[in-house]
Image (cartoon, rainbow, N blue to C red):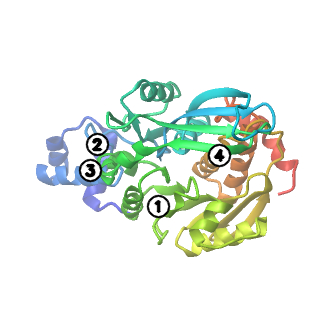
């Protein structure tokens, strides 16, 4: 983590007092050369204390989410699915993607939120960005390209709402390269927390994790799937909080498991040993395991009456990040995440339309109504 030198601290203090001060004015006040002040300002931007030109000061608690932005199509079967023939379904269209869903959940919970991704120069991409802006999310760093269309995902669900088959057109994310991280770096460096999902190419993830080692923000990462978990580096140091489900964890650790909470706890501990500072391993309706420097604990899932499981894991991540940004320890934060994940399963939407701080408070009693 970068610390400020005496001159850097003095320059920052003057800018806080007067964000419109010019470099020559700052130089004269501090008795420094203008070129020295310019160099200090450049460093303050790189370290995240300023947001580039104009000396805009970052908000005290801000999250930046990097990763998937997807147009989702969900088809829920009205009866047991029969292969190799037509099945009657109820269809739904919405915006999705792990990082996008987490961003929208966080914004609804009241966290100042920025979202960084890549979308196509098409109607779907424009609609997706307009929706996020309408939620108060900063999308100024999103890349728009004409090379590939906006990502799409189709989910086939059984009558209970469980995923039977997922189809993903995610080729556009291969275009999100390390240079995009560098161009948005002052935006990232000024955040309290950065979250990335493994929809990003491996080289981009590695670059972000490496650059984070000298930054002030906390970095959280989600594996997304067993196929994409391999994009993470072998050394997980630099990741402050790692999210995986039990299958992703087992794939990453090259192990088999019993699919019990004890097994999830062991997997979380092994992810710590691989370098992650903290790890959360989820098991859906069975619960979650959380490994921190204080030890490993597991919790049963919050009881729910599920309607649709899509988006529940992303909501759990958002709730956990919301808790950590509210200065909770990761055990307490994960319990909040578990609650929001359960609430999301009771909605047909990937992001619960009623989610808000008030809605969360009204449902906090459910954390005490189950064992965990």
> Measuring 69% from the left and 54% from the top, which residue is drawn there?
334
Q: CA distance from mark 1 to mark 2?
A: 31 Å
Q: Label 2, on which residue?
A: 52
Q: CA distance from mark 2 to mark 4?
A: 30 Å
Quarter-wise, where is residue 81 in the image? Answer: top right
Q: Label 3, on which residue?
A: 11
Q: Are marks 4 and 3 in contact (CB under 8 Å)?
A: no
Quarter-wise, where is residue 19 in the image? Answer: top left
User: How far across and down, in percent of the image, does residue 360 sit?
Assistant: 72, 37
Q: Would you call the spot at circle 3 few (<14 residues within 10 Å), some (14-19), or many (20 or more)?
A: many
Q: Would you call the spot at circle 1 few (<14 residues within 10 Å), some (14-19), or many (20 or more)?
A: some
Say which quadrant the C terminus sits in: bottom right
Q: Is residue 202 above or below residue 58?
A: below
Q: Label 1, on which residue?
A: 231
Q: Label 4, on which residue?
A: 319
Quarter-wise, where is residue 359 in the image? Answer: top right
> Measuring 72% from the left and 29% from the top, which residue is drawn there?
89
Q: CA distance from mark 1 to mark 4?
A: 25 Å
Judging from the image, what secondary structure is the residue with disc 1 in?
Answer: helix
- The mark nearer the N terminus, 3 or 1, is 3
């Amino acid at each position: 983590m970068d610390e400020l030198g005496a001159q850097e601290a003095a320059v920052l203090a003057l800018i806080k007092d007067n964000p419109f001060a010019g470099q020559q004015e700052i130089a004269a006040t501090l008795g420094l050369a203008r070129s020295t002040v310019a160099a200090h300002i450049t460093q303050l931007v790189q370290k995240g204390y300023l947001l580039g030109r104009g000396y805009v000061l970052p908000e005290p608690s801000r999250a930046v989410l990097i990763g998937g932005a997807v147009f989702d199509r969900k088809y829920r079967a009205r009866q047991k699915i029969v292969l190799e023939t037509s099945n009657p379904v109820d269809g739904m269209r919405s915006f999705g993607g792990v990082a996008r869903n987490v961003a929208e959940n966080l914004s609804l919970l009241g966290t100042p939120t920025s979202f960084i991704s890549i979308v196509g120069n098409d109607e779907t991409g424009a609609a997706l960005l307009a929706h996020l802006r309408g939620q108060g999310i900063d999308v100024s760093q999103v890349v728009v390209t004409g090379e590939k269309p906006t990502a799409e995902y189709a989910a086939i669900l059984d009558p209970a709402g469980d995923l039977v088959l997922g189809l993903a057109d995610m080729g556009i994310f291969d275009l999100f390269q390390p240079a995009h991280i560098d161009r948005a770096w002052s935006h990232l460096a000024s955040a309290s927390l950065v979250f990335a999902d493994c929809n990003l190419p491996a080289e981009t993830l590695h670059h972000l994790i490496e650059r984070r080692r000298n930054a002030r923000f906390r970095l959280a990462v989600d594996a997304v799937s067993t196929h994409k978990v391999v994009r993470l580096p072998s050394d997980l140091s630099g990741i402050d909080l790692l999210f995986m489900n039990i299958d992703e964890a087992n794939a990453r650790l090259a192990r088999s498991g019993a699919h019990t909470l004890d097994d999830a706890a062991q997997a979380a501990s092994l992810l710590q040993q691989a370098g992650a500072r903290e790890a959360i391993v989820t098991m859906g309706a069975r619960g979650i395991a959380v490994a921190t420097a204080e030890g490993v604990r597991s919790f049963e899932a919050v009881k729910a009456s599920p309607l649709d499981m899509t988006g529940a894991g992303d909501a759990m991540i958002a709730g956990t990040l919301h808790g950590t940004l509210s200065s909770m320890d990761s055990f307490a934060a994960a319990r909040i995440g578990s609650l929001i994940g359960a609430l999301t399963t009771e909605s047909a939407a990937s992001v619960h339309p009623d989610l808000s701080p008030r809605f969360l408070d009204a449902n906090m009693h459910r954390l005490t109504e189950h064992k965990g």
